[in-house]
Amino acid sequence: MIFDDAIADAILRGMVLSAVGLGWVILLVRIVGLRSFSKMTSVDFVMTVAVGSLLASAAQAAEWQALTQIMTVMAALFALQVIFAWLRGISPRVGSVIQNTPVLLMRDGKILEQRLTDHRVARADLMAKLREANVTDFSQVRAVVLETTGDVSVLHGAQLDEALLEGVRT
């Protein structure tokens, strides 16, 4: 306890621990790089959620030992993310084990209903993504892809370069 007053102590402790935790995350991101929170893969997405949760835990740590453990876990997660990225780069097999494959949900204006069912995507959710992409007619849609992170990409226009569907389960 820093102050005798429990409320003042809780406020100061929360502020100090939040600053320490945030500073630690900033340092780790500076070491590892901006890709840390890129959401390019499912591992990146999990990393983002986990670090956010750990940062909240750090701000509430009751003892320095708990804060140290939380900061160690954060560093370990960043290190694992670097290792997974490296392994994916050198081994396509490892990449296929730890990485989901993007899935085509719509092609050339046609909804692939079975894909929606297989991947538990509601038709209403697909329509919402099409509206967000300013699609006014299905004929404008070249492809809709459910990405590895769960994001939905809507590709529309006059034509589609097939290279954009590289690695997508069609």
Image (spheres, rainbow, N blue to C red):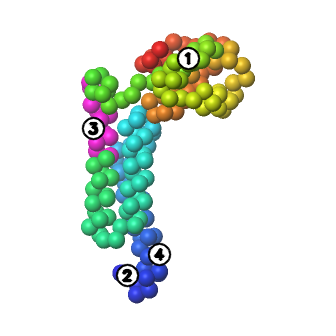
Q: Nearer the viewer, mark 3 or mark 1?
A: 1
Q: Amino acid at mark 4?
A: Ile
Where is residue 83? Give x, y as percent. 27, 37
Query: Residue at the location (42% across, 60% down)?
Result: 56
Range of magenta residues: 78-91
Q: Disc 4 to disc 2, how far (Cα)?
A: 10 Å
Tell me: residue 102, above or below residue 23: above
Tell me: residue 14, above or below residue 37: below
Q: Amino acid at mark 1?
A: Leu
Q: Amino acid at mark 3?
A: Ile
Q: Are marks 4 and 2 in contact (CB under 8 Å)?
A: no
Helix, strand, or loop for circle 3? Answer: helix
Q: Would you name the residue on which mark 1 appears?
A: 112
Which mark sits nearer the N-terminus, 3 or 1? 3
Q: Residue 5 is drawn in which quadrant?
A: bottom left
Which mark sits nearer the N-terminus, 1 or 4? 4
Q: Would you name the residue on which mark 4 appears?
A: 11
Q: Nearer the viewer, mark 1 or mark 2?
A: 1
Where is residue 38? Give x, y as percent. 45, 39
Q: Are marks 1 and 4 in contact (CB under 8 Å)?
A: no
Q: Is residue 30 visible?
A: no
Q: Residue 45 is drawn in which quadrant?
A: top left
Helix, strand, or loop for circle 1? Answer: loop
Q: Amino acid at mark 2?
A: Ile
Crowding near pointer 3: few (<14 within 10 Å), some, many (20+)?
A: few
Q: Would you name the residue on which mark 3 appears?
A: 83
Q: Would you name the residue on which mark 2 appears?
A: 2
Query: Residue at the location (56% across, 18% down)?
Result: 113
Where is residue 73? Give x, y as percent. 29, 53
